[in-house]
Amino acid sequence: MSRPKGFLSLSWRHQLADDVIMTELEEGLMQYGVLGMKWGRRRPRGSDGRVTEVPSDDYVNSRKNKQRPLKALSTKEIQELNNRLQAERTAKDLQSAGALRKIKVGTAAVGTILAIGTTANAVIQIANSPVGDAIKKALAKRA
C-alpha cells in the first residue's frame, strides 16, 4: 500500500544533541528547538553570540540591597538579603573541595560500618542455624 505524494506520517523520531532537541518526521521535515523552552522566546546572547546566563530577579535585588546602607533597608529587605546570602554561602560550602572530601570520608566510614554489620549479622545467622547448634554442642562436649 503506497502513500500519496506529500503525505506525512505521524510517527516522530527524537534525537538529543547537546541541549537542542530535533524532531524529525518520516519524510524529512525537521524541527529544532531547546527542550522545555517556550515557543517564540529567544535566549539572551552576549556580544560574542554565545548564550548568556540571565541572573534571577532575586539575585539582582540582593546585589542592589547589598550596596545600600542597612539603615535605608526595611526589615523585610534585610531578611530577604540575609536569606539569599545565607543560601549562597551554603551552596558554595557544599560545592567546595573540602566538603566533597568530607563526604567521601563519611561515605567510606559508613561503608566500613555496614560491612562490619553485615559480617556480624552473618555470624549471628550461622550461630542460630542447625550448623551453629551442632558447633555449640561439639564445643560444650570438649569443655
Image (spheres, helix red, strand yellow):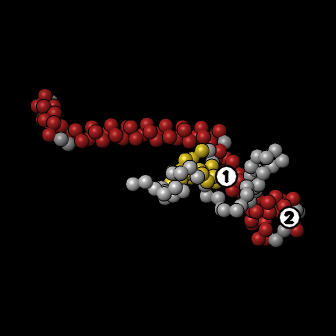
Labels 2 and 1: the sequence-earlier one: 2
Q: Residues within 10 Å of mark 1 (few under 14, many from 20)?
A: few
Report the amino acid beneath label 2: Leu
Q: Residue at x 56, y 49 (%)?
A: 28
Q: Position of residue 32 (x, y in %)?
A: 63, 52
Numbered badge on residue 70: 2
- Quarter of the image where the N terminus is located: bottom left
Q: Is residue 19 left or right of residue 66?
A: left
- 35 or 57, nearer to the observer: 35
Relative to residue 20, is residue 117 drawn left or right?
left
In the displayed structure image, the side of residue 27 where residue 62 appears, left or right: right
SS type, badge 1 = helix
Q: Nearer the viewer, residue 21 or 65?
A: 21
Residue at point 79% right, 71% down? 75
Residue 13 in view (yes/no): yes
Measuring from the top left, give residue 104's x and y in whole percent: 54, 38
Q: Residue at x 78, y 51 (%)?
A: 45
- Using the numbered discs, state the Cα–Cα distance from disc 2 to disc 1 in whole angstroms: 23 Å
- The quadrant holding residue 71 is bottom right
**In the figure, residue 39 lies in which quadrant?**
bottom right
Q: Is residue 47 above or below residue 112?
A: below
Q: Nearer the viewer, residue 3 or 69?
A: 3
Q: Quadrant of residue 73?
A: bottom right
- Residue 85 location, x and y as percent? 74, 57
Q: Position of residue 83 (x, y in %)?
A: 71, 61
Residue 46 circle label: none
